[in-house]
Image (spheres, rainbow, N blue to C red):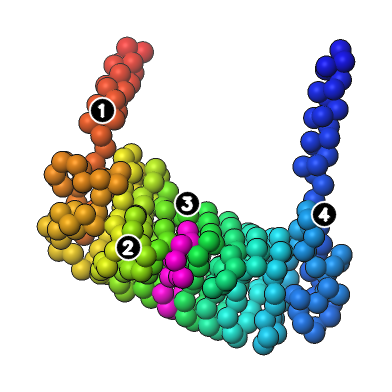
Amino acid sequence: MKKMMTGFIAGALLAAGASAQTYTYYTGSTASAGLGNAENWSDGLPTGAGVVGMITNNVSMPLGGTSFAGWTAVQTAGTISRGGVITFDQGVHWTLQGGTVTSGQHVAIGSTTTAGTMVMNGGALVANTNFLVRSGSSFSQSGGTLTFAGAAEIGANGGGTANISGGTGSFGSISVTGGLIAFSGGSWTTTGNLHFGGSTTGAGIRFDLGDGSLTVDTVSFNAGYIDFVTGSDGTLTVSSFTDASNFEALWNTGRIRRDGANTGTFADNFTVTGDTLSVIPEPAALTMFLVSGLALIVYRRMR
């Protein structure tokens, strides 16, 4: 009985700790300094431990920008706009569930010296130039839209990850320079070039389990490779490629791999339809699929 009571109390304390978050709401009641003015929040800036800032209305950021140092914020509506650069760094954790973040220049996750995190479940990120995910920083997208006239630079300054499981992205070009884009869903496109450079030594793009897709016009490599995980339904489309030989040439030079390796022939591992590449399921997985399908047919006929 004593052990049960002890366990109950411990569980209650854990539950209380998990629900200890407090919320401060952006009111925008004072125009000066925008987000960075504590008077514009119902309970001050969202900088303390367990404090979450909620943003549901429009914000025009001042020319000098706003420091998000240590912030945890959730944007569900409204538009955050600035004519200059918008940078999410200094340990910020920003969740975009709705609304829009728009910049007249570029949007950066992390800076050259500090990291940041953005989770995008909905809404829109829009900028006239580039989308940067810098060293040590992470961007996750399960919904919403990215629209950038310039490049998506993943791993700017080395490192940085983008995990894409949903939503869409449109860019002028895509550059991977020491970072990683992992697709398990969603769709990114560019009418320009996909380039691998910088310190990219491993996979710069990886198609994990799921059905993510990437469409580019051309592709070039100074380093790194594109990896397909066995079982992935992901697709790579290169609109300038005319047939399978273009993809096979990248396989032969180690720029396209399966599970990080080049085992067997290209035809053993991949199939090409027009200008689109996808991985062939493992023989065992394909056999299981066929057997399951046959069993289902037999079962239906017996009923």
Residue placed under numbered mark 2 in the picture: 215
Question: Rounded to the nearest whole Å, what is the CA distance between mark 4 and mark 3?
Answer: 29 Å
Q: Would you place residue 33 above or below residue 92 in this image?
A: below
Residue placed under numbered mark 1 in the picture: 284
Look at label 2 and name its amino acid. Thr
Q: Using the image as rendered, state which of residue 61 and residue 2 is in the foreground.
A: 2
The secondary structure type at the circle numbered 3 is strand
Residue at position x 80%, y 30% in the image: 11
Question: Rounded to the nearest whole Å, what is the CA distance between mark 1 and mark 3?
Answer: 26 Å
Q: Marks 4 and 1: CB-CB under 8 Å?
A: no
One can see residue 6 in this view: yes
Query: Are there few (<14), some (14-19), or many (20+) residues within 10 Å of tag 1?
Result: few
Look at label 1 and name its amino acid. Ala
Look at label 4 and name its amino acid. Thr
Find the magenta span and give its range: 148-161
Residue at position x 25%, y 50% in the image: 257
Look at label 3 and name its amino acid. Ser
Mark 2 vs mark 1: which is more N-terminal?
2
Residue placed under numbered mark 3 in the picture: 165
The secondary structure type at the circle numbered 1 is helix
Question: Rounded to the nearest whole Å, what is the CA distance between mark 2 and mark 3?
Answer: 15 Å
Residue at position x 29%, y 25% in the image: 288
Q: Position of residue 159 (x, y in %)?
A: 46, 62
Q: Quadrant of residue 173?
A: bottom left
Question: Rounded to the nearest whole Å, what is the CA distance between mark 2 and mark 1?
Answer: 29 Å
